[in-house]
Image (tube, rainbow, N blue to C red):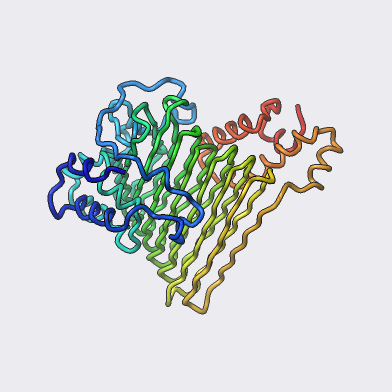
Amino acid sequence: MNYTAAFEKLNKKEGSIENRAFNRVEKMGLPTRKSEVYKYSNLSHFKNLTPNTDASVPHKIPEYFKHDYIKDKHILVTVNGIFSESLSTIHEDESGLIITCMCDARKEYRDIVNQHFNETTKEYPDYFSELNTAFAHCGIFIYAKKNTHTAKPIVILNLGSQQKEDTLNNQRNLIVLEENAEVTIIEDYSNLDEKIDYNLNHFSEYFLGENASLKVGIYQEENNGFYFIGNKFFEMSRNSRLKTTAIDLGGNFIRNNFRVNLNGENAEAIINGVFINNKKEHTDDRILINHNAANCQSFQTFKGILNDESTGVFNGKVYVAEGAQKTNAFQSNKNILLSEDATMNTKPELEIYADDVKCSHGATCGQLDEDAIYYAETRGIPRDKAKKLIVFAFAQDVVQQIENEDFRNFVERRLVHNLDLTEYSTFESVQSGIKE
């Protein structure tokens, strides 16, 4: 990657956050498989990419990208990692909610940005988050003031547009919820043109104040030219609540990196995800939850469905600090391999320094249950269709965790479409395997 020439174009001041981040990037170098955190993911594709320094965005997006579930919601559009105000729809009827671009936020909300921006990277320096800090475009800033309860979810429509194949886009978001604020965010990743190659290094920082509540839904359905690094770091205060559900239905290379710090007593984090990989697609889910205070809870449920020659990785770790008594942590990773050539590497971990805790973890990899297939066949369902119905039911455990009904129904429809189960008229009929 030609970092130096691209960074010089940005003309950042000596000693700035961006300059310091760039120095760390040069010092660390691109991780290899010798690094434990990238042991099963080949990053060679990123070696020859050049960070995008073009800040232009299209003026119009096709109507078919305006999915029906986004109606009556705040719609924030980014193109190649850059926020576009002209393509976005922000309702003004919710007091206490500030939505703007990071460039304006750095001027109008300087104290808040200075207090939080890049704070999550100090404890665990990460190559791609540092790279993002050095080259980030003007992303999204969301600020919910004390006691703000948003009635409308915030949909972030992340679009990729035509550009040079060797370009890496760096999108940076900052989300701050003050005490007792409640916000729902849905992130949707799509390409404006299904044929284009698109590389995205996404980084979002989230800060939850006392008693704050944040729900995040993530949907991704890209093509074989999509390479994605997604860092999402959460800092949680006392009594705060977090729930995320990630749905990955496509993309050549997907790396999801969730890091959650439970810093205040009685905080709760629920992190769920499911992916379906075909051909030679690769999905790598890495989750680190740090219990830094007593009486906190965390729950992880991740599932993988792998077909053809696809590969998958799960590395979920729960860390319980000394003094974090009464911790309750549960971690589950289950995977179905539909092909003999598919590969899954899973590694759940617990690291505990307190003695009064309840922690469990488990992981499974296997094929479809032949008894379940046989049962479906005895009801007149062809074997191939029976397999798809079982896969749908397997994924549904996670999908059903999505609380926003419009978004959940959209995801279910995409699952039905991708699994070629459209002859079933309702979700209930798909689940039961009975045509109406």
Q: Considering depth in this image, is 320 or 383 the residue closer to the camera?
A: 383
Q: Residue at x 48, y 44 (%)?
A: 254
Q: Considering depth in this image, is 337 or 425 the residue closer to the camera?
A: 337
Q: Looking at the picture, how far across and down is residue 423, in whole percent?
A: 70, 25
Q: Looking at the picture, how far across and down is residue 220, in whole percent?
A: 49, 38
276 over 59 or under it: above or below: below
Quadrant housing residue 101: top left
- 189 sits to left or right of 205: right
396 over 325 or under it: above or below: above
**Quadrant including the N terminus:** top left
Quadrant housing residue 105: top left
Q: Looking at the picture, how far across and down is residue 40, in whole percent?
A: 51, 54
Q: Residue at x 44, y 32 (%)?
A: 190
- 6 sits to left or right of 258: left
- 373 sits to left or right of 238: right
Q: Considering depth in this image, is 259 or 92 the residue closer to the camera?
A: 259
Q: Considering depth in this image, is 47 or 212 the residue closer to the camera?
A: 47
Q: Residue at x 38, y 63 (%)?
A: 238
Residue furthest right as drawn = 378
Report if residue 147 is visible in the image: yes
